[in-house]
Amino acid sequence: MKKIYLIISAYNEEDNIPLLIEDLKKNISSHELNIEYVFVNDGSRDRTLEVLLEQQKEFQEITIVNQNKNFGHEIAMTAGLNYVVSCNDNSDCKYAVIFMDADLQHPPKIAAEMIELWQSGKNLILTQRTDNDDKGMRYKILGNAYYWLLNFLSDVKIPKNMPDFRLLDKKYVLWINQLNESDRMFRGMLSLVGLKEAHIIPFVAPQRNAGKSKYNFWKLYKLAIDSMIQFSVKPLRLATVFGFLGILASIGFLAYSIYNSWVNNEPKTGFLTLLSIMIFLSSLTILFLGIIGEYIGRIHLEVKNRPLYFNEVIKNENR
Ligand code: UDP
Ligand code: MG
């Protein structure tokens, strides 16, 4: 029997869940498939868990992976994925996983399209936002700059405007599951595994239904730093390059000032020049210390090898 797992991460989405479930039922249940709705409640502070439990009484196919506290979206998706893998440990059942958000920005209609494509043999289905009704001009410009920098610095190519709305066949699920780094970024991990087989569905992301976006400036900043550092050591190499350039420049300056004082007899003090060069160089040193610190911090977290999350799985009593 073929099975589809929908992994839906939810953090404070009480108002969206009933609507999402209704919409999913409308669009997906017509497919003759075994479907399980895996809601990962990422430590919500509102009534998300209560709403999910109410819905579960009505719909047995809902499983709640209840995170003990808020661990973040990437970890929530990992928890969902681990649940799916653990369910299928000793079975050779064919299955696929669809990741989606709980705020209705990932239209269930497209999830239905993914399922059809999977049944016709596609193993990796990604989506690409052609537009995002939710975000303003500033976000779009910053977003473009971010992807440019990211792909410049990173060793794996990370495609632009691809949200976490995607279908992975079992094969990809097992591959991703082998990556056991504690710093998670699905976009990068997928690129690492390979996107050659990917089928892409373009779509316009509608506005979030209710509630607010959980990605504030600092979360985005962390995501940006994470994605630049996780898949490459280029930022470190950049420090060496700047170091070399600095040495060359200083030799040049030295030669120039010796020439000036010997040949032209011009003993200039150049206090401001010195000051600005000093400030520039020490800021550069601090910047690269910061970058090295980012890597060391990650090594520190990685060697501890702590569990990524704590959760319990809640199923309908009759299952
Ligand atoms: N989310 C989560 N944990 C978090 C932050 C977000 O599980 O710490 C979920 C959130 O409930 C939503 C999805 O991740 O279903 C995407 O978040 P959001 O809509 O805030 O991001 P945006 O669409 O604005 O990029
Ligand atoms: Mg959203």
Image (cartoon, grey):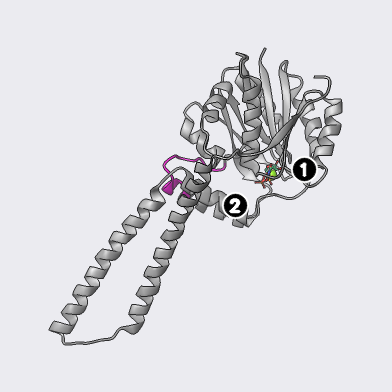
Q: Which of the numbered marks, if any, corresponds to residue 13?
A: 1
Going by the numbered disc 1, the residue's amino acid type is: Glu
| Magenta: main secondary structure | loop
Residues rendered magenta in the picture: 150-161
Q: Relative to the observer, which residue lies in front, 107 or 164?
A: 164
Q: Residue 27, position in %: x, y? A: 75, 26
Q: Residue 269, position in %: x, y? A: 28, 86
Left or right: residue 56 compared with residue 271? right
Q: Is residue 165 visible?
A: no
Q: Residues within 10 Å of mark 2 (few under 14, many from 20)?
A: few
Going by the numbered disc 2, the residue's amino acid type is: Leu
Q: State the residue position of label 2.
A: 220
Q: Residue 62, position in %: x, y? A: 77, 27
Name the residue rendered at 66%, 28% in the picture. Answer: 83
- State the image quarter where residue 184 is shown: top right
Mark sitting earlier along the chain (2/1): 1
Q: Which of the image's four quarters has the N terminus?
A: top right
Secondary structure at badge 1 equals loop
Q: Relative to the observer, which residue lies in front, 83 or 187?
A: 83
Cβ of mark 1 under 8 Å from ligand 1: the answer is yes
